Image: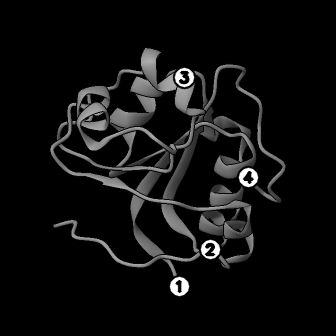
Amino acid sequence: MALDFSIGIIGSGMLGAAIADALWRAEPRSLLMANRSGTVPGIDGFPPQNVLTDPQALAEACDVAILCVPPAAARDLRIDAKDKLVISVMAGVPLADLTRISASPRVIRAMSSPAAAKGLAYRRGSRATP
C-alpha cells in the first residue's frame, strides 16, 4: 500500500522511530525525519540522507508533519507549517500550543505507543479535514 503523500517526523526517540518504522513499510512518497543529532533510526533500508537536523527544512519538504518530541521540548519548537497537516503525539500539549508551534490551523492531537512499529497502535477517531 503506497502512500501518495510525503511525511516528516520531528523527533526520532522511541515513539518517533516506531511510527517511522511502520510508515516506512507503508511506502510513503517520501519519509523524512528530523532530530538534533542527525542520527539515522535503526530502520532497514532507511536512507541516511532522509534524516535532517533542521525541523523547518523538514516542514517545508513534506505534506504531513508528525511531532514526536518530548512535551518539555515543545516550548522551544517552532516551525512554519501553515499549509500542512500537523499531527502531534506529544502528551499534554494543548491544541492552542500546537497551533502556535506549527502556525497550522490543521492540527491533530493523537496518542500512540511504541506498538505503532508493528501496526498495533489504537486510533479512536478524528475530526480532521483534508
* Callout 3 secondary element: helix
Q: Amino acid at mark 3?
A: Ala
Which of the two marks, 1 or 2, is nearer to us in this view?
A: 2
* Callout 2 secondary element: loop
Which of the two marks, 2 or 4, is nearer to us in this view?
A: 2
For label 1, the residue is: 1
For the residues labelled 4 and 3, the Cα–Cα distance comes to 25 Å
| Image quarter hosting the C terminus | bottom left
For label 4, the residue is: 46
For the residues labelled 3 and 1, the Cα–Cα distance comes to 33 Å
Q: Earlier in the sequence, mark 3 or mark 1?
A: 1
Q: Residue at x 53, y 32 (%)?
A: 71
Q: Earlier in the sequence, mark 1 or mark 4?
A: 1
Disc 2 + disc 4, Cβ < 8 Å: no
Residue 77 or 30: which is nearer the viewer? Answer: 77
Q: Amino acid at mark 1?
A: Met
Above or below for 22 versus 10: below
Residue 95: x and y in percent read: 28, 43
Which of the two marks, 4 or 3, is nearer to us in this view?
A: 3
Residue 36: x and y in percent read: 65, 20
Q: Residue at x 80, y 55 (%)?
A: 43
Residue 126 or 85: which is nearer the viewer? Answer: 126
For label 3, the residue is: 73
Above or below for 114 versus 15: below
Residue 41: x and y in percent read: 77, 44
Q: Mark 1: give few (<14), some (14-19) or many (20+) Cα within 10 Å.
A: few
